Amino acid sequence: MTSERNTDIEIRLLIEAIYLKYSYDFRNYSGASIKRRILHALRQFDCLTVSALQERVLHDPGMFMQLLQYLTIPVSEMFRDPGHFLALRQEVVPLLRTWPSIKVWIAGCSTGEEVYSMAILLREEGLLERTIIYATDINPHSLDRAKQGIYSMQSMREYEENYRLAGGRRDFAEYYTAAYGNAIMDNSLRDNVTFADHSLATDSVFSETQLVSCRNVLIYFNKDLQDRALGLFHESLCHRGFLVLGSKESVDFSAYSECFEPLVKPERIYRKS
């Protein structure tokens, strides 16, 4: 019991040290989630204690960047939850057409799969040319991978079924070039994409948008940070703009529950009240 308590104290000190040294704020992330990630990192870095890990992180910025890959866990796939993208296509796109220009914010874009999925959907609906997509994340390594748009061919074969179920209208292979066992996404898909470092824990809104997509990110935050993020999305969205969340996320019981109304509630698609 004492050992467990010591570990919890060490984790709090590590998270505070990261904030003070590198300005990355994990203090309001879900306690259970962040603890699980740090303990996993301990084994990978052969550290006996969290304090030993903290010493290495404080004195070696390169070590911190390695740890960041465990703290953020970039996991994504193209057209994840196809029913969600089908609902976007059928219920949201017709309303997006009413704006002469469109801005989309993909918060927590990870390694870019969500970005390219959105770009493909908008292209097929004739909206990509008048859309600016802001793709943000706190992990610079993930952002670099998103900009490159290179994914394994094995993954692309799995994504192809998602694309079909999401209402895809073309041959999925038209959107990438195969080379050396990898797929390179068509450059034109990111012509209107701006990739940027942004933290939902510390940064503010940077543009008015018509649609905000933040899927499977809030589940890693505690309630205070969830409310902060929802506040940023509410501030960013224009009148009657759209908010889309992950399958296990909701605005219900948040400080902003009255600020959004469900458009397609099973798919976590909301509209600013």
Image (cartoon, grey):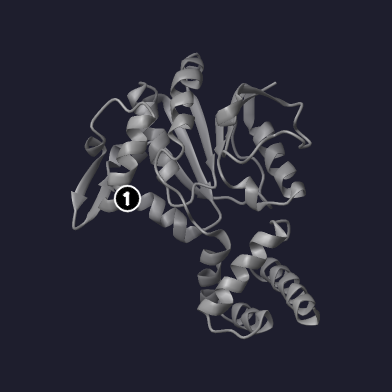
Q: Which residue does the image show at 57% across and 38% down from the upper left?
A: 247
Q: Please say if 182 is above or below 227.
A: below
Residue 235 image-quadrant placement: top right
Residue 176, horizontal then vertical, whole percent = 25, 42
Task: Tell me: 266 left or right of 174.
Answer: right
Residue in front for this viewpoint, 209 or 251: 251
Res. 40 visible in picture: yes
Residue 47 image-quadrant placement: bottom right
Residue 244 image-quadrant placement: top right
Task: Tell me: 13 left or right of 49.
Answer: right
Q: Which residue does the image show at 28% across and 52% down from the upper left?
A: 154
Q: Quadrant of the C terminus?
A: top right
Which residue type does callout 1 highlight? Ser
Residue in front for this viewpoint, 145 or 45: 45
Question: Which residue appears farthest toward the left when viewing the image?
Answer: 179
Q: Which residue does the image show at 32% across and 50% down from the upper left?
A: 155
Q: Quadrant of the N terminus?
A: bottom right
Task: Tell me: 178 left or right of 108.
Answer: left
Res. 24 visible in picture: no
Residue 149, horizontal then vertical, whole percent = 34, 49
Residue in front for this viewpoint, 149 or 248: 248
Task: Tell me: 167 left or right of 225.
Answer: left
Residue 218, horizontal then vertical, whole percent = 64, 46
Question: Which residue appears farthest toward the front when viewing the image?
Answer: 1
Name the residue carrying label 1: 155
